[in-house]
């Protein structure tokens, strides 16, 4: 008798916990969020020395990611030399969206100021 009551209580709990209404589930159309990468048309190339880099993949990728996130940088290239104290990089950017000061600020604040940048030159880039 006690087993029947326990079975009945469990069955009633299951029936009332399962609703016939569909849960608020997002449709694939609602979930699909297009992440459009901003197209940057560079008109300047900044050449700089960066200290604090230990590898091109990790450090270089971190710098590249942070600079591209500004919406004003299109490409970052490195002349990476293993164990060199200073690495040379070229940063292609749109000067109407970002300037050398902001680029330096972004690089200098990555990973708790791991990197330091020294701008060597800024040149115009020919439009394609």
Image (spheres, grey):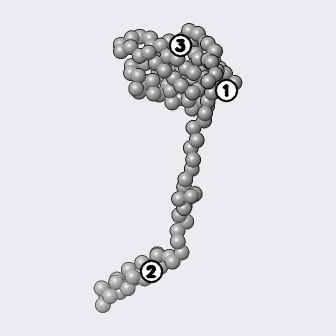
Q: CA distance from mark 2 to mark 3?
A: 68 Å
Q: Residue furthest bottom?
A: 1
In the drawing, what numbered circle is on residue 15? 2
Residue to which mark 1 is pinned: 97
Q: In what quadrant of the picture does the C terminus appear? A: top right
- Residue 33 rendering spot, x and y as whole percentages: 57, 50
Instruction: Bin the neighbour count of mark 3 within 10 Å (Cα to Cα): few under 14, some 14-19, many 20 and up.
Output: many
Q: Earlier in the sequence, mark 1 or mark 2?
A: 2
Q: CA distance from mark 1 to mark 3?
A: 19 Å
In this rendering, the label closer to the viewer, 2 or 3: 3
Instruction: Bin the neighbour count of mark 2 within 10 Å (Cα to Cα): few under 14, some 14-19, many 20 and up.
Output: few
In the drawing, what numbered circle is on residue 89? none
Residue 86: image quadrant is: top left
Residue to which mark 3 is pinned: 48
The residue nearer to you, when weighing 66 against 44, is: 44
Q: CA distance from mark 1 to mark 2?
A: 59 Å
- Residue 17 rendering spot, x and y as whole percentages: 46, 75
The residue nearer to you, when weighing 39 against 81, is: 39
């Amino acid at each position: 008798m006690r087993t029947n009551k326990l079975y009945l209580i469990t069955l009633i709990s299951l029936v009332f916990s399962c609703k016939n209404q569909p849960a608020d589930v997002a449709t694939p159309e609602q979930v699909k969020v297009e992440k459009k990468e901003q197209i940057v048309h560079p008109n300047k190339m900044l050449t700089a020395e960066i200290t604090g880099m230990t590898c091109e993949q990790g450090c270089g990728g971190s710098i590249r990611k942070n600079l591209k996130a500004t919406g004003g940088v299109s490409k970052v290239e490195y002349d990476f030399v293993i164990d060199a104290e200073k690495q040379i990089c070229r940063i292609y950017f749109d000067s109407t969206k970002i300037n050398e000061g902001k680029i330096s600020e972004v690089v200098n604040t990555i990973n708790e100021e791991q990197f330091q940048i020294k701008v060597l030159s800024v040149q115009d880039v020919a439009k394609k």
